[in-house]
Every structure is written in structure tokens, then in C-alpha cells.
Amino acid sequence: MTIVSEHDIEELRFSLKNRLGEALLLTSQEDMLRYCRDWHGDVTSSAVAVIRPRSTKEVSDTVRACAELGLAIIPQGGNTGLVLGGIPDEPKRQIVLSLERMNAIRTIDSDDFSAVVEAGCILSEFKDAVQDKGMFFPLSLGAQGSCRIGGNVSTNAGGINVLRYGMTRELVLGLEVVLPDGTIWNGLSTLRKDNRGIDLKQLFIGAEGTLGIITAVSVKLYPNPEHVETALLGLNSLDDAIKLYRRARRECCDLMSAFEFMPPVAFTLAIEAIPDLKMPIAGDYPAYVLMEISGSGLVDTADLMGRFLEGVMEDGLVLDGVIASSRAQAQSLWLFREGMNEGQALRGSHMRTDISVPLSKLAAFVAEAEAELAEKLPECLAVSYGHVGDGNVHLNVLPPNGATPQEREAFIYKSKTLVNEVLDRYVGSISAEHGIGRLKRSDFESRLSDVQRRMITGLKNAFDPDLRMNPGCQITLQPDS
Amino acid sequence: MTIVSEHDIEELRFSLKNRLGEALLLTSQEDMLRYCRDWHGDVTSSAVAVIRPRSTKEVSDTVRACAELGLAIIPQGGNTGLVLGGIPDEPKRQIVLSLERMNAIRTIDSDDFSAVVEAGCILSEFKDAVQDKGMFFPLSLGAQGSCRIGGNVSTNAGGINVLRYGMTRELVLGLEVVLPDGTIWNGLSTLRKDNRGIDLKQLFIGAEGTLGIITAVSVKLYPNPEHVETALLGLNSLDDAIKLYRRARRECCDLMSAFEFMPPVAFTLAIEAIPDLKMPIAGDYPAYVLMEISGSGLVDTADLMGRFLEGVMEDGLVLDGVIASSRAQAQSLWLFREGMNEGQALRGSHMRTDISVPLSKLAAFVAEAEAELAEKLPECLAVSYGHVGDGNVHLNVLPPNGATPQEREAFIYKSKTLVNEVLDRYVGSISAEHGIGRLKRSDFESRLSDVQRRMITGLKNAFDPDLRMNPGCQITLQPDS
């Protein structure tokens, strides 16, 4: 690897400006900072430039210019990723390509239940525009006020509505992609059924920009769920929560739209972050579930939620519960779920996971991992919560208050190793919804079989033989490997 | 291309038997016939051998043996495909690899709502086994008594439940695949959320065996819909049927499981095939819809269907209708939908399409295509029906009774050209659910953009550089292309 000097970088910047025009580039450290620091603030990097194209053509021009200059490209949406997939790791050889200026909503068609939106559109802005037309785009996650739809697709984002509507992949009808050679592929179909051979768009969903740059997306829309019932329930255990989920799937059919598990400490953490939150249930319970049923038109969700809870309380599966009587009350119940994330952040750097195991093994996995943590790292606080209906749990480990940064780092390393060892015994996934990025790359690669690695390498060679697209993300490859 | 003599073929058969054992091979024309003739009986071919492995290992052995002998492989499931994707087209250079002996159901897990099943299991047998455990596998299509699950996945089969549960792709959690070099990839995860990078299984779904051979599949299961309401409705037009669909999506939410459009001639055709069918509605209407709402547990589908129909009849959107009052009655309503296919077959060879356009354009497309057909081919009968809720219509054209085979062929060619021309104006798909195979290859290739072709060629080169996997299916490639 040749050394790149500051002088070389200035020359590269000059060449980029020449080719693309001053207006597309940011090059000062100050301007580039927010594109080069991750969402959690754990990592701060730099780049030759941040390039912000305004059209698909300008994305293509940028890709071609970078190829000529031997620069690699880190595509970036809202920079809300949790695995460092959009942060440069070789600042002198990489540019950040931010899609944030490509934020138009091209069409919303309520007759077709579909829309076409550019990659840089902020998720919540898209959802609002869709709702204004009486429709619903189901992808819902904490970062929705900042994340951008292209990033959601590139990372195949999950969130709280997966159990009813699927991951982002299942919401995508078509893509527009700028390929590593600068070619534009217009695959923005809104057809709901189209079975013409290999489904090329699937390659780019979840690839985190390693095979091309998604510039626009066509998606499915749904009828707006006019009736939403939200309930917070107290239970005896995670095991009972999973029993409750199974029963809800049968009794409430496809109308359940969220099923979130929270341990008692969730409320402590939420109140640390949002002090005026009031506990909505009087007693203390070992486990809590936040559950939502939603529907539109003639479906009576209130009656359904009422009868469902009546049955499960009669059977002792749910010990106590509260159903929100207004939209505002529902939002305040959700504040606990969101506040617990903020509360964890306030306790300082900690170990975060994004695990999935088969639903039938989730309770056993959490019990085993928490028992090992209690034995081997008794100073730490384990917090297990999440979208358990999908078998997805965030088992996080918080070092004790007052731990030094070095101690925290050691706790994080030890607890991650310990949890992953338990996870491997359960043949689970180290990334249920967040992706791989750079943060999970080595954990990912160490679990890859030879045949998987060969397939991924084959794809990279076919699409991006010069390794210009987000190198270092997901997998380590050397040219000519 | 070198000439292959009968002597050479006998040598190849001898070598295959030597390597794989006599028990795996069929080589007589008589034994091979049912694997080499398509479902409609339009094409009869032959092969060097039909090989029927009993295990993933034997599939792998077969792939390696064929590579050594320079033979190409045509993977085949139940041989119910409609586009000649599983029929050899170079009988002296190809073997048929039938998965029919790999028909075990490995697991059905009602706690996880998942199952693992081998590629050769017949769809209806799998569905029955799942139902015995109180669960439901939603894929439903006419051929389900003969088609096999591996073929369903390889062709990304559609069917009548797509609008609620999606195409086969959306039901697949994982795959086991034998790659073109004989390597076995075990990707049979049952995790519902797993976001570890590029989703490799997506490559094989819908690839019709051109990238590898699917030997087993893990799938999602659903709660068994215990309450099913089936209604046959008379309407004024296809346009009204689409209005009805839109309204049903809003008012019945995600509980609508089927929405099939039929023209009046459907009933004539059905009664030609099943003479004792009785028309369930008294009057004659220009358009009919067969609609199903289904649910489980506490969801009151009967009430929902009743209130929905009351509203749409009051508004004049539905003119008359009948709701099945028993499972038997519901089945007899479905007999019209199935019988109309048989009735078309009884009228002799005809032009079949499998078209999708955006829902908002479906009625206009059908009107335009039918008007052109009426003007230019007035002797023929156009029959447009299908899963209109997905924008999918089968616009078939039946030559007049008494037409000679040559005349039929000319009518089929002319009507296909005409319909495709209209379709291209609507930017629709020539294959909504059937795939490409060999039958639609030239229509597919002539519409491929350069960038699509490059991506597909790149994938083939990466996975199957020697073009051994179903060559001639989907795309025409020459070695070293």
C-alpha cells in the first residue's frame, strides 16, 4: 500500500472539484464531521471528501470520477446505522457519498398501493406524506426522524412492525441502482407480481452498499390502520411472554402489529431518561409486554383486544394490564420503550447486541446468557428486551456506574465474547436486524463457512471487481483475492 | 458443437451408472417419458438419463459426475411448470435431475411457526402435514397435488393467496442448495430475522435451477385460518372489480386471502369441463369475483364479510352475490375457478399469458387488448381472468373450434404478438408468476436492458461458469460469453 500524503489528498480534492463541480463537495474537517462520526459517537473518522449528489446522474458521475482517481466510496444515508457500515475506515482513500440531497418523493399512488421515493428521503417524512394520502408505510424504528429510506433498504432495516409487515426487503417492489462502473440500472417497477427470472434487486437489499448505490426505491403501501389498540401487560416471565405471543398470533390472526418485551429495569432506565414518566401499572411484575393490534375499515380491533386480554388474564398468563384509551396514552406507553434506549445511553458506553434465535429457544437462550453474565460479570447489568415475536432480542450489558473507559472497554469485550459463545450454542444470528457493517465484520467472518465466503466473493468479483464499493464493510477482501 | 452419437450416449449412461449406481438412473425412453414431456403435453423431449437422487449427498455426487462427463443438468420437481423450465432441449447433452425421491418433511415446529422440507415433497402433502399440526402453509395453486416444493421455490410460485401471504419468496426462511461445483450449502436457518449481509438464498429463488439445485427449504408457517368466508359476486365490469378490491383492502384489512376475477365465459368453460356444476347466482352479470376472507381465533370473519357485502351492495358496486354457508359450498364455488382452466384445455391448444400491470391500469389494459383481439382476430375467444388484486391477469386466447393444428399455431403466434405489444405500452410483465423457462426466453431476452443482461451474465459466470445448470433456461449464454 502506497502512502498517501496530505499533498496527494489536496490533489484528489482538486480533481474531484474539477470533474464534479464545487457544489457537490465538502472537504473541510468541520463540514465533514457529521458524515464521519457514527450515530453513537463511538467512532470519528475522516475522508478525502463528502460528495452530495443531487440526482442519479450526479451519483453516476461521482462513481466514475472516483474510479478514475482510484478512490473508494462509502455510501451513506441518514448516518443512523449501528454497525459502522457508513463510516470511512481509510480516510485517505475513501469518499463518503451522501444521498441526503436526493430526497424527492417521486410518486405516491393510492390506487396501486405503491410509491417511488429517492434514497435520501427521511423515513418519517415519507411516512407522513404517505399518510396524508390515507395510506401507510409500515417501516417503524427509533431513528425514523433521521434515517433515510435508501439506508433502510441497504441495511434491510427491521423495527417494531416486522412481525406483521416483514423486514424492509418485503416492502420493496423495485430499485434504481448506480452500479460500481457508474451504469444506472432502472429497476423501479411498481408491479406487485413480476417473476421474470432472477430477482436482481434482492442483491442490493441488505448489501450495505457493497454491490452498488441505491438511488431510489419503489415500495408497497398499505391501508392506513385507523384503529390501533395499544396495551402494556405485566407477566410472570419471558417464557410466558412467548406463550402469550403464540396465543396472540392465533387469536388475533394477522392483526397484531407489535409485540415488544421489556424487563422491569426497562422502566427504571426509561425514567432516568424521561423523569416525568409515570408507571402505568400499579404492581411490579417480572416481565412486561407492549402489544399492539391494528386494523382499518370494518375490523373491530377494540373488541378483539378486549376479548383477547380477557381470555389471557382469566388463564393467568397476563397478571395485569392497561389498554391505552387514547392516541396520547398509547404514545406515552411507547415512551417507555423508547426511553429505555436513551436511559442505557445515559449510563455510558455499553455492550449492545442484536440477536435472533428460534422463537422456541429464546427464553432458554436469554436465561442461559444472563446466568453466565451474573456469574462471570456480576458487576454488570444485563438488559434483555426487544421484538421477541420475531425471535429478536437485544441483550445489552451495562458496565457499573463509575467504571473507567478502560474498564468499560474490558467489560464490553468480555460480555460480548460470553454472549456470542452462548449464542453459537443456540445457532442464532449475531445480527437480526442491524446488519454487519464494520463493527460486526470479524464476528461475521469468523462464523462464515467456506462455501458462503466463496459465494460472497464471487458476487463481489462479478459486481465490484476493483473493490470500490464500501470496502471493509461486511467482509475483508483484497484485490485479486 | 461436436456431434454426439448413440454410441456416445450409451457410454455416458454406462459411466453415470458406474459412478452413481444403477438405482439412481432411468435411461429407457419409456421410463424417461414422463420427465421429458411438459405438463400441457405440448413438448416431448428426451435426455441422456433421468437421475433420481435420494439424498443431498447423492445430488452432489450427481452434479460432480455430470461435470466430469461434460453433461448439463435440468433440475426438475413435479414437472408441473408452465414455461418448459424443467424439460431438456439438448437431449444428447443433458440429464434430468429429478428431486422426487427427496420428499421428506424434516421438521414441523408449531412453536416456531416454521418447517423444514425436502425439495421433492409434493406441495399438498406438505400442506396436509402442516395442517395436522394446527398450522397453515399458505401457498395454494392448481397443481398442488403434483408440484413439489423445490420447484415452487425455484420458480417463486404465486397462486391464489399471494395478496395476503406473498409469493413463495416471502415464505422462505432458508435453503439447502447443491452448487454447480457439487458443494453443498446448508442455509436452512429457521430464524425469522437474520440480517447478516447479502441474503444469498434470494439468488436461487426464481432462478429456475440456473445457479444451483435447491434440495431442501425452511419455510414460515401461519396459524391455521379456522374461519374462511367465500363469496361469489356479480358485478358490472372489471373496472368495478378493481374498485371492489381497493375497498376490500381497506375495509377488510389484511384478512382478505383471495380475490379472483372471472368473466361470464368462465362459467361456460367450467361447465364444459364439469357438466354437473350449477350456476350459484341466478342472473347474468358482466363480471364475477370470487373473494375469500379468512381468520383464526377471535376474529369474526363471518360478521366482517356480511357487513362488507352489505355496504358494497347498498352502493351498487356488487349487484348480486352468494356467500358459501359450508366448506362444501365454498369448494363448489372454487370448482368454477378450477374448472375454467380445464375447460380451456378441452378446447385444444391455445394462447396463454401470465401478465401483470399496475393495478390502476389493469382494466384499461384488458379493454385495449381485448378490443384489438376482437378487431384483428374476431374468430378467437379472449378469456381474461386471474388474481387481479395483484395486478395479475391471465389473458388467454382460444382459437375457434375446428381450427387445424397449423391454424391454431398461427392464431397463437398472432395473438401473443398482439397482446405483448399492448403489454409493452403498459410497461407490464410477461411473467407475473410462471417464470421464464424456455418458453418465454426469447420474449424475456428481447426486453432485457444491457445492464440487466450484464448483471445476469455476471451471476452465471460467478456461480456456473461452465454453464452446466439448466442451460437454455431463462437466458441464452455461450461459454466464454
Image (cartoon, coloured by chain):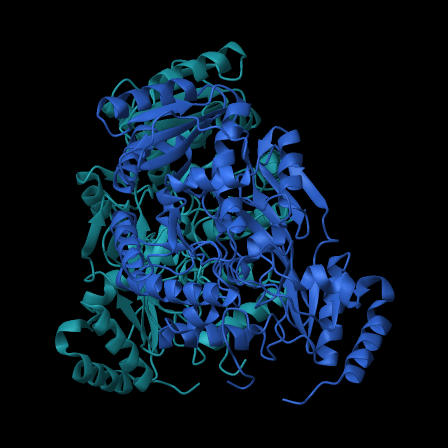
Chain colours: A cyan, B blue
Q: Quadrant of residue B471?
A: bottom right
- Percent position (x, y) of residue B466? 61, 80
Res B190 seen here: no
For residue B123, above or below residue A34:
above
In the rendered image, which quarter contains the C terminus of chain A?
A: bottom right
Q: Nearer the viewer, residue A181 or A439?
A: A181
For residue B367, above or below residue B340:
below
Name the side, left or right, on which A109 lies relative to B373.
left
Res B448 seen here: yes
Q: Residue at x 34, y 27 (%)?
A: B283
In the rendered image, which quarter contains the N terminus of chain A?
A: bottom left
Q: Nearer the viewer, residue A208 or B86?
A: B86
Q: Residue at x 60, y 65 (%)?
A: B43
- Percent position (x, y) of residue B430? 40, 61
For residue A76, above or below residue B279:
below
Q: Please identify the residue farthest to the bottom as the structure is shown.
A: B2
Q: Please identify the residue farthest to the top as the structure is shown.
A: A314
- Percent position (x, y) of residue B246? 28, 37
Name the side, left or right, on which A3 lies relative to B269.
left
For residue B227, above or below residue B373:
above
Q: How many marks?
A: 0
- Percent position (x, y) of residue A158? 40, 46
Name the side, left or right, on which A160 lies relative to B29.
left
Q: Please identify the residue farthest to the front as the structure is shown.
A: B402
Q: Residue at x 77, y 63 (%)?
A: B30
